Image (spheres, helix red, strand yellow):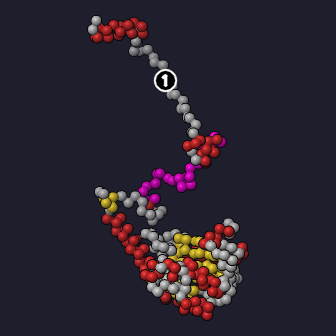
Amino acid sequence: MDDAELRDLVRAAVVKALGPRDAAAPRPERKPMPEVRRPADPSTVKLAKRVALWNKAELPPPPALAHFKPDLDRASYLARTPARLGVGRAGTRYRTSTLLAFLTDHAAARDAVASEVDPEVMKRLRLVPIHSAARDRSEFLRRPDLGRRLSQESVNLVRKQGVRSPQIQVVAADGLSATALNVNLPLLLPPLLGHLERAGVRLGTPFVISLGRVAAGDEVARLVDAEVLCLIVGERPGLKTAESLGIYVTYMRVPRFTEAMRNVISNIHRGGLVPEEAARQAADLCLKALKERRTGVDIRP
């Protein structure tokens, strides 16, 4: 018996056992199998998911995803941020417009680092100009320690013109972006001083430090024996924030000072925290520091 005969024999036996099929006979309805959801292994999920698993509750989406609307088009999201999102490519390279925008922003950041305080703007704001121990911008960038202390001439000027023992001493410094100071300080300083004056606190003589870093403001506050220092400084420029200011509020009358004793308000510019709102927040923080006699991580929320 060859293979063909064997197959025919098996087929005949199967047909005999099953019987002939009627094509018109109704077929039984197939019901979908119920979905079987296996519980997740608690050792493979984070604590929040494990708690939700134990309580048999659904975990809500993160806040960032809760507002995500996939039906919006690309332009809607690009209009909400200055970040470079979805810039695309031309072949293996950036598009010409993308590259030119990048080079423009990078040049603006470099110019901000090399910029200088505008004396006319500071004069209109009635700020007394002083200088750090750095002789020029190049030395200021190479020697951060010199930007943290005042020159001897400036020390003498602060002692001569500064109001003694003020409750709040306001100091401005160019930091790494004098452009930020020139653009935003006229919008920030008047409302800040106005808030503090209406609160009835004793203010010191406002100074502006050229080539100054944050610690240079500490020296001004110590020279006049100020209780609270409010330092306004130009922040390190980025590709979209070459005009950003930061405000450091520090309670100075402490036996031992650490950097954790500062409070910071940052990203102050027209595309971030607007100067007028930053002035209100800084004034509230200064008054709170006066009341609680502390700042930084020790201040009450």
Q: Residue 137: percent from the left, percent from the top?
A: 44, 82
Q: Residue at x 32, y 62 (%)?
A: 95
Residue ID at (64%, 87%): 224
Magenta-tinted stretch? 55-77
User: Which amino acid, by three-letter code, is at mark 1?
Assistant: Arg
Q: Is residue 198 in view from this perspective?
A: no
Q: Quadrant of residue 159?
A: bottom right
* Image location of residue 142, percent across then percent down: 45, 78
Q: Say left or right for 186 vs 9.
A: right
Residue to which mark 1 is pinned: 30
For the N terminus, give its image quadrant. Answer: top left
Magenta residues: mostly which secondary structure?
Answer: loop
Along the viewing direction, whichever of 235 and 181 lies nearer the viewer: 235
Determine if residue 32 is in view.
yes
Total numbered badges shown on the rendered structure? 1
For the view shown, which residue lies furthest in the right direction? Answer: 291
Q: Residue at x 41, y 15 (%)?
A: 24
Quadrant in the picture for residue 54: top right
Label 1: which secondary element: loop
- Depth check, front residue: 200 or 41: 41
